[in-house]
Amino acid sequence: METKTVDGVTYTLTRRDAPQNDLHNWYWLGSDGTVLELDEPEQRALRASDVILDE
């Protein structure tokens, strides 16, 4: 779940520069500079993955 394509734009899972590593710091950064927030199923998948530490 590190990349996805929407309407021909490739988005990469990216973390905002923030002191806490929580779900709200993650977003999709598009190759064209656009930003998408994670939807609910993506947040659940990210929480279940090894990408972040659930505190």
Image (cartoon, rainbow, N blue to C red):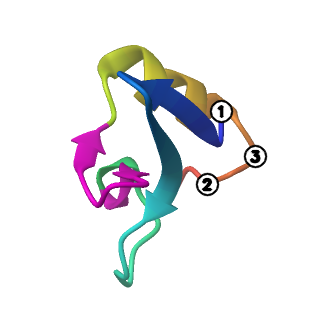
Q: Which amino acid type corresponds to the residue marked 1 in the rendered image?
A: Met
Judged from this view, the residue extending furthest toward the front is: 8
Which residue lies under the disc numbered 1? 1
Q: Nearer the viewer, mark 1 or mark 3?
A: 1
Which residue lies under the disc numbered 2? 52
The mark total stands at: 3
Element class at badge 3? loop
Mark 2 crowdedness (10 Å alpha carbons): few <14, some 14-19, many ≥20: some
Which numbered disc flags the more N-terminal residue, 1 or 2? 1
Q: Main secondary structure of the magenta part?
A: strand
- Identified at 40% across, 74% down, the residue is 20
* Along the line of sight, the residue nearer the viewer: 25 or 6: 6
Q: Which amino acid type corresponds to the residue marked 3 in the rendered image?
A: Asp
Q: CA distance from mark 3 to mark 2?
A: 6 Å
- Identified at 65% across, 42% down, the residue is 2
**Circles 3 and 2: CB atoms closer than 8 Å:** no
- Measured as percent of width and height from the top left, residue 8 is found at 43, 28
Mark 1 crowdedness (10 Å alpha carbons): few <14, some 14-19, many ≥20: few
33 in magenta: yes
Which residue lies under the disc numbered 3? 50
Q: CA distance from mark 1 to mark 3?
A: 11 Å
As drawn, 2 above or below 34:
above
- Measured as percent of width and height from the top left, residue 54 is found at 56, 50
Element class at badge 2? loop
* Magenta-highlighted residues: 25-37
**Circles 1 and 3: CB atoms closer than 8 Å:** no
- Identified at 38% across, 50% down, the residue is 30
Mark 3 crowdedness (10 Å alpha carbons): few <14, some 14-19, many ≥20: few
Q: CA distance from mark 1 to mark 2?
A: 13 Å
Q: Is residue 47 left or right of residue 1?
A: left
